Image: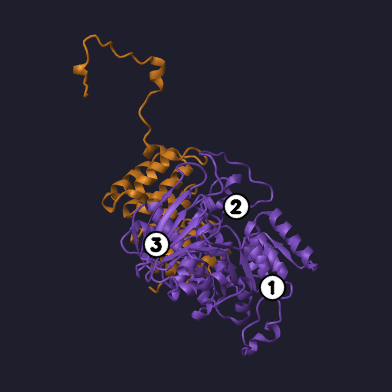
Amino acid sequence: MATSSSSLPANTPEATPIPKSYAKGIGTTPDPWERCAQLDYGGDRSFAWSVRQQVLRTPPAGRAKVERQLLATLATPDATPAGRAFLCQMLALVGSAQSVPALARLLLDPTATESARYALEAIPGPAADAALREALTALSADAKAGLIGSIAARRDPAARPALVALAAAATEPAIVRDAAARALAHLPPL
Amino acid sequence: MPALSTALTRRQFLRRSSVATAALAAPTILPAHLFGQSAPSKKITVGVIGAGNIATGHLDTLLGFADSVRILAICDVDRERRESATARVNRTSGRNDCRAHADFRELNRRPDIDAVYICTPHHWHALIGIDAMRHGKDIYIEKPMTLTIAEGRALVTAAHRYARVVQHGTWQRSMKRFHDLVAFVRTGGLGKLDRIECPIGPNNRHVGATWEPEPVPAGLDWDMWLGPSPWRPYHSHGCHYNFRFIADHASGQITNLGAHCLDIGQWALDMDHSGPVEIEGHGDFPSSGLFTTATEIDVTFRYANGMSMRCFTQHEGGGNNSARFIGERGWLDIGYAKMSASDPNLLREMQTAGKRLALTASQNHYEDFFDAVRTRRRTIADAEVAHRTTTVCNLGTIAMTLGRKLRWDPVKETFTDDDMANRLCRRALRSPWSVA
């Protein structure tokens, strides 16, 4: 039998008011899209899981919007390293040229460079290629070797001159020179 | 159901296979370079990279090949494991010539080593394998060959480029029963084949929804253990053995167990240079906690010839790595420990089917590898075969992750209509690592 407030008997008591002490703990349900910026290693990751499922199930037509949501969360000033790592993992799945500027900035941040590079390596198009190439003069040692690996994976022919120079640069550590030499074998000619 | 039960554990099978086997094939004229330094009588020198659970089984067997193999190196990032394994080899051989290495690059660059056994967590397989081949080593690489489809193709390319021998750890290919099964199925022994089923066991490790980072144990190089996978803090439940259940390092039971039976399915379907064209499935993935791979799986692979192969979690009666072939004349369920059939006559027919088809055979997975190292021929489970089998497993993981039907082009090795699925075919590696 359907009921509504207008159909309740006249002598129905008023609803018991919520005690103030209890009301303090009641708030809005945390938005998982905001919470995943504060992801911690080892903590509850179920809210990140729900964001992940939404990302995976979003059809192509909806991915630009999802990408903007991820970028907005990534811009959270107090995002944790684990949070940024997760958000960059998601951007690796749906990211486009829209994400490149934000990721290019993170690529130069030593606390986020790896996560940013994981996303950039997966994003197709010349903007991501350019961001990776430009970082060659900013990163060093192990991070630079990893960057070269991403460039090799993307087979960016425009990186050839820079890699030729790095392979021969006596000022670069062996790990960078070796990475550059191996990467050159994977690049198509200019 | 009628069953012929040969209750062999995997280790018993490997030990029995190490005893003298059937006579070699008819004499072959050997190239001159196989004499002298490279003579067949020269022992093959081996290094083992990764000294954990699987390596222990390999050492059990390799030490039994004292007449043809010398183990000269053990590498592990865990000091206790590498020192213990090295001491064991030296104690057993009595020669004290096996050295311990903390870094696989050192081992791979030793000119006195012919071949390496790669027994590390899966996220290291491609990188170590390619590095080894680049430095002149043949490789025995544990299954799954690689963590991603892209890494698999890179490893196959490297094997061709450096002209190296590769043997994949899908040792069931060297068991007579599976050779007979494949010959029987391919020559119509079951009549028209309807489908293949591959039940696999469930996860055998479980953890809670949260975890606290722990101090890295003394002697474990955690940074090197992680290698190319994304950084995270150490926890004892996220390292030895359990890496199988963490997606940054492995793909769960579909590769841990499924690789064996899916490999037999690929072989029987004559798909060793191809694969399915459609994949659909479901996986239950943990929403929190350290483990991230599916705990329950059910995925079906469909091939262009209309055949289907299903891999699914079976809680009771698993552990046989069996493949069940169902056709017009009945069914055969063949695993490494047990065999059963809808009719005992089918089983008897299958066991004499080996001669029906000129199918490359191997009686012993180790000897097949050693002979290939000497003669430079292909192994029974070479790089391309290994890559195609591993790809089936990885396709299943991608389909379960996305929860939608996917279409795969086995020639181009891309999904035909799913950009996200294509992105999941590869992963960026943590600095400074690269498979280039």
Q: Chain of mark 1?
A: B
Q: Answer with mark 1 or mark 3, whichever residue precedes in sequence.
A: 1
Residue B315 in the image: x percent, y percent? 51, 49
Residue B65 rendering spot, x and y as whole percentages: 71, 71
Question: Is any part of residue A79 visible from this angle?
Answer: no
Q: Residue furthest top?
A: A11
Give the image quarter of residue B17. Answer: bottom right
Q: Position of residue A17 (x, y in %)?
A: 33, 14
For label 2, the residue is: B241
Render colour scheme: by chain
Q: Secondary structure at mark 2?
A: loop
Q: Amino acid at mark 3?
A: Phe
Residue type at mark 2: give it. Tyr
- Colour applied to chain B: purple
Q: Colour of chain A?
A: orange
Sequence-first tag of 3 and 2: 2
Q: Secondary structure at mark 3?
A: strand
Q: Where A54 falls versus B255 (above or below)?
A: above
**Nearer to the camera, B61 or B97:** B61
The residue tagged 1 is B45
